[in-house]
Image (cartoon, grey):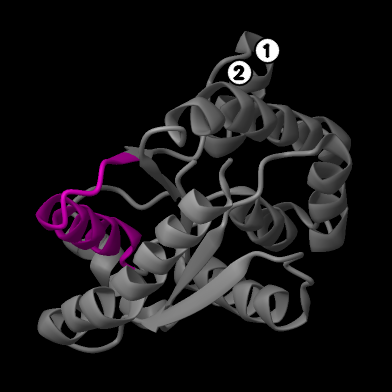
Amino acid sequence: MMPFVVLEGCDGAGKTTVREMLRAEMDAACIPTVTIGQHSWLHPWHARTLVCAREQRSQASPKTLSQAYMHDKRLHGLRNVEPMRRCAVVIADRWFYSDAVYHEALYEIPKQWTLELHRCAGTVQPDLLIYIRAEADQAYDRILQRGRHTRHYERPSDLRRIVAGYEQLLSNCDLAGVELLQLTNELDFVTLQRQVQHVLMPVIQKLILTMNQECP
């Protein structure tokens, strides 16, 4: 069994950049790696609810929205993450922690409600959670540099609530054995790369060794 690694942070924090740096380091170390997105899209009804919410086509009730996201993540873990991590490190761009933070910031759904829903459902938890910290204004500047229209949850006011939500969640949440690492993406590219090489990679390599030793 190989580690399941999750990247978290607001839009524009630099998750994609860190993910690609990690993949390059893994390739150089001959460590099999696969990356996945945040949704499974395996259940048509729940997928429709997710798309309508993301694109503001319609507004579901808090219960319906939470249930749709929970079922999507649960299937993602069972059908995608667990099979793939038998032979490769799985790196996910977001997991249910982002659902908890974004849903509270955007829809006033309490974070604890979302976390408890996933706990009761038995949604797969990561072995390593990497939070990429960035100031909301810097994150917004990066979003604008992508050259496309911003989404409704990428506005500065929303980003500030989302960043504050992450800080609160990771300061007070019981991660139940999940290892947490935090990177600061407010510096230059080279410094960020060094954090990936000298902070993230040793932890992931240690996790691989530990998990292989524990397997019968």
Residue 175 seen in the figure? yes
> Residue at the spot x=36%, y=52% of the render?
150
Q: Are marks 2 and 1 in contact (CB under 8 Å)?
A: yes
Residue 177 in magenta? Answer: no
Q: Which residue is mark 1?
A: 45
Instruction: Reply above or below: 189 against 126.
Output: below
Instruction: Reply above or below: 170 against 18.
Output: below
**Chief secondary structure of the magenta span?**
helix
Mark 2: which secondary structure? helix
Among the 4 quarters of the image, the one containing residue 21: bottom left
Mark 1: which secondary structure? helix
Label 2 amino acid? Arg
Residue 152 seen in the figure? no
Relative image position of residue 183 (x, y in whole percent): 39, 80
Q: Which mark is residue 48?
A: 2
Callout 1: few (<14), some (14-19), or many (20+) C-alpha neighbours within 10 Å? few
Relative image position of residue 128 (x, y in whole percent): 52, 62
Callout 2: few (<14), some (14-19), or many (20+) C-alpha neighbours within 10 Å? few
Q: Is 164 positioned to the left or the right of 111 in the image?
A: left
> Residue at the spot x=14%, y=56% of the render?
24
Residue 27 in magenta? Answer: yes
Question: Which range is magenta?
Answer: 14-34
Relative image position of residue 203 (x, y in whole percent): 40, 72
Label 1 amino acid? Trp
Nearest to the observer: residue 132 or residue 56: 132
Q: Residue furthest front?
A: 216
Q: How many marks?
A: 2
Among the 4 quarters of the image, the one containing residue 215: top right
Q: Is 81 positioned to the left or the right of 146 in the image?
A: right
Q: Is 94 positioned to the left or the right of 146 in the image?
A: right
Instruction: Reply above or below: 186 against 13.
Output: below
